[in-house]
Amino acid sequence: MELFEETVAREDIFSGVVVDVHVDKVRLCDGKIARREVVDHNGGVLIAPVTAAGELIFVRQFRYPYGQVLLELPAGKLERGEEALAAGLRELHEETGSTAGRCVPLGKFYPTPGYCSEVIHLFAALDLTEGTPQPDEDEYLELERIPLERAVEMVLNGEIPDGKTQTAILKIYLKRDELFAR
């Protein structure tokens, strides 16, 4: 059996600044019809700044949907048509003031594949030159440096609930010999 769903009908529900929502009727691989609610998103990028001392530079930021401050690696949404690495370098500079001498792709992250089209591109930023953060006018951040090994412990202890940040930390940790070899 081929695993596939064919769109039969689409109803656009909402068009916003960050997301659009539509409800589709799909034909399943067994021929039955089902309903799919989809949130369309342009995608995002996470760029993990790694200092020469092996620390990650995090941002603390209030996240409205959860009503709490989260510890995350710098990230942001892609503008329509924007290349992921360019967006990552922009976010790195805006949120931390840093520029990277070298960026290493860490793959893609699908945060909620059951109902959302968002794809987050992950990068490690190395050989940093640090400067002054320049956040967006509606963005309030606090920076925090955490050694990579401690960040891994924090992920394993449930202290960092953000999925994209967890994934990037663990990938950097597992690839550390390759990333830091020079």
Image (cartoon, helix red, strand yellow):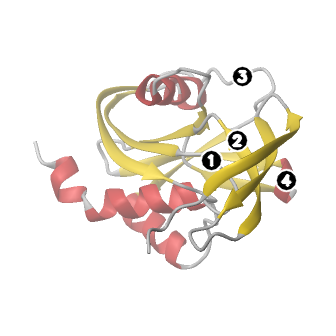
In the foreground, 86 or 35? 35
Q: Which residue is mark 2?
A: 40
Q: Which residue is mark 4?
A: 65
In the picture, the quarter occupied by the N terminus is bottom left
Q: Marks 3 and 1, how far apart in space?
A: 25 Å
> Type of residue at label 4?
Pro
Q: Contact, CB < 8 Å: mark 1 with mark 2?
A: yes
Q: Residue furthest bottom?
A: 157
Q: Residue 174, located in which quarter of the rendered image?
A: bottom left
Q: Earlier in the sequence, mark 1 or mark 2?
A: 2
The vertical placement of 63 against 82, above or below, is below
Q: Contact, CB < 8 Å: mark 3 with mark 1?
A: no
Q: Is residue 155 left or right of residue 37?
A: left
Q: Contact, CB < 8 Å: mark 3 with mark 2?
A: no
Residue shown at 64%/59% (left/top)? 112
* Label 4: few (<14), some (14–19) or many (≥20) C-alpha neighbours in 10 Å: few
Return the x and y of residue 151 as percentages of the image width and height.
47, 64
Residue shown at 37%/49% (left/top)? 107
Q: Marks 1 and 2, how far apart in space?
A: 5 Å
Return the x and y of residue 43 as percentages of the image width and height.
59, 38
Q: Marks 4 and 2, how far apart in space?
A: 18 Å
Return the x and y of residue 54 as percentages of the image width and height.
32, 51
> Type of residue at label 2?
Asp
Q: Which residue is mark 1?
A: 117
Q: Which residue is mark 3?
A: 136
Q: Earlier in the sequence, mark 3 or mark 4?
A: 4
Q: Residue furthest left?
A: 182
* Label 3: few (<14), some (14–19) or many (≥20) C-alpha neighbours in 10 Å: few
